[in-house]
Image (tube, grey):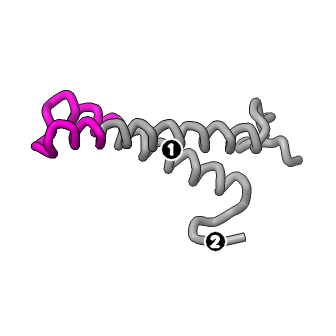
Amino acid sequence: GGQQGGGGRPRLVPPIAELRMVKKQQEDLVERFKRLEQQVRAGGGKEIDARERKLLERLSSLQGALKRKTSEFGQRAGVMEGEEK
C-alpha cells in the first residue's frame, strides 16, 4: 500500500510529513547561506577566512544530502528525475 517503504517495511513517517521536513531543512539551509553571505559582505567582500570556508563546505555538504533525500523521495513516490506532474 501507500505506507510501504523499500523492502516491504512499513514507513515510520508519512510521505507528506517527510516532504515537509525536507522543505523545512532546505529553508533553514538557505537562511544559513544568506547569513554567511552577509558576513562575507560585511567584511568588505574580501576572501573568506578559514572558519567561513569550513562553514561553506559544511553547508554545501548539507545541500548535497538534501538533494539526495529529495531525489530518493521522488523515486519512492514514483516520480522520475526531470519528470513534471
Residue tagged 1: 66
Residue 68 rendering spot, x and y as whole percentages = 51, 48
Residue type marked 2: Glu
Residue type marked 1: Leu
Specify the label residue 83 is tagged with: 2
Residue 40 rendering spot, x and y as whole percentages = 22, 40
Residue at left offset 63%, top offset 71%: 83
Element under disc 1: helix
Residue at left offset 14%, top offset 42%: 44
Is residue 1 found inside the magenta-colored segment of the image? Answer: no
Residue 79 rendering spot, x and y as whole percentages = 68, 63
User: Foreground residue, 40 or 42?
Assistant: 42
Q: What stretch is highlighted in magenta?
A: 37-58
Task: Answer above or below: position of 80 versus 48.
Answer: below
Which label's residue is closer to the chain start, 2 or 1?
Answer: 1
Q: Give the Cα separation between the discs numbered 2 and 1.
A: 19 Å
Asked if residue 38 lies left or right of residue 8, the reply is left
Asked if residue 32 lies left or right of residue 77, the reply is left
Element under disc 2: loop
Is residue 39 found inside the magenta-colored segment of the image? Answer: yes
Residue at left offset 76%, top offset 30%: 12
User: Foreground residue, 25 or 41?
Assistant: 41
Outermost residue, right direction? 1
Q: Find out whether the residues at labels 2 and 1 contact each other: C-beta distance under 8 Å.
A: no
**Secondary structure mostly taken by the magenta-highlighted segment of the chain:** helix
Asked if residue 52 lies left or right of residue 32, the reply is left
Residue at left offset 31%, top offset 37%: 36
